[in-house]
């Protein structure tokens, strides 16, 4: 079994930014996992939540947070709130002057995310039950957009709602494996970086995989 301290020491050796380490240290990952799995909260592998969904492994979460280049005061839109762990980390980094809207299509996860975030005193996060691929035009444009589910392509509405100079991050591919794509919007076009191969649960909704069947 891994520990928080072991992960922090490993990431410090890789010179991960202090604000990311501070957020990881401040947010108790064990708060977001089922009681029977809390002893494994800091193992570096995914953990199941509900409705065939999962909490990404710590190293994957850190790769995504690092790629987002977050800063205090930014506006962030997250597709796939899950149980709220990554939203908690993002909110800690962007601070109370930032704005985070996180959405999920699964009602149980929306409820769990709201509950988990409120219990940690993170009141400046908005959790909505919605099709994240459509974005949230009422609060756009966003500095950062992150998709935490596998998608065939990055939905166009999200690209339209990204500020110029903003970053979108998404695992793009098929349901078996994806490439983590980081896109920086420059004069209306995306400049792409590819951050390696990952496996995420599939995106649901209008811009997700049509063949999935998740009860």
Image (cartoon, rainbow, N blue to C red):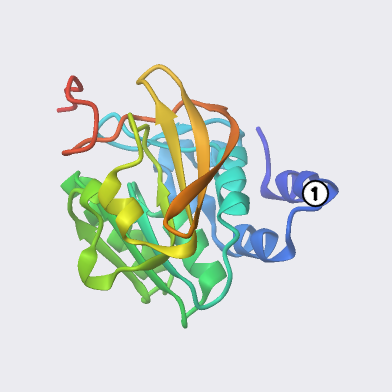
Q: Which residue is mark 1?
A: 9
Q: Is residue 101 above or below residue 194?
A: below
Quadrant of the image containing the C terminus: top left
Residue 109 visible (yes or no): no
Secondary structure under the numbered disc 1 in the rendered image = helix
Q: Viewed as shown, does residue 85 lie left or right of 10?
A: left
In which quarter of the view is residue 115 placed? Answer: bottom left
Residue 68 vs residue 18, the one in the foreground: 68
Residue 123 rendering spot, x and y as whole percentages: 36, 76
Residue 93 vs residue 157, the one in the foreground: 157
Q: Is residue 112 above or below residue 209?
A: below
Q: Residue at x 54, y 37 (%)?
A: 57
Q: Residue at x 45, y 35 (%)?
A: 171
Residue 184 rendering spot, x and y as whole percentages: 52, 53
Residue 97 rendering spot, x and y as whole percentages: 47, 83
In which quarter of the view is residue 201 placed? Answer: top left
Quadrant of the image containing the N terminus: top right
Q: Residue at x 45, y 64 (%)?
A: 164
């Amino acid at each position: 079994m891994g520990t928080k301290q072991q992960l922090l020491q490993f990431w410090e050796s890789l010179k991960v930014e202090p604000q990311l380490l501070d957020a990881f240290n401040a947010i108790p990952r064990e708060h977001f996992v089922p009681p029977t799995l809390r002893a494994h909260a800091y193992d570096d592998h995914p953990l199941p939540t509900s409705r065939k969904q999962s909490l990404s492994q710590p190293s994957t979460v850190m790769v995504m947070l690092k790629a987002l280049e977050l800063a205090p005061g930014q506006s962030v839109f997250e597709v796939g709130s899950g149980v709220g762990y990554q939203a908690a980390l993002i909110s800690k980094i962007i601070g109370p002057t930032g704005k985070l809207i996180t959405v999920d299509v699964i009602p149980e996860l929306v409820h769990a995310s709201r509950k988990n975030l409120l219990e940690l005193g993170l009141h400046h996060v908005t959790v909505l039950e919605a099709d994240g691929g459509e974005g949230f035009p009422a609060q756009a444009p966003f500095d950062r957009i992150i998709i935490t589910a596998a998608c065939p392509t990055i939905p166009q509405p999200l690209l339209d709602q990204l500020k110029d100079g903003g970053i979108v991050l998404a695992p793009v591919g098929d349901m078996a494996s994806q490439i983590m794509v980081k896109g920086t919007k420059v004069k209306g076009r995306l400049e792409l970086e590819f951050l390696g191969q990952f496996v995420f649960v599939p995106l649901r909704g209008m811009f997700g995989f049509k063949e999935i069947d998740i009860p």
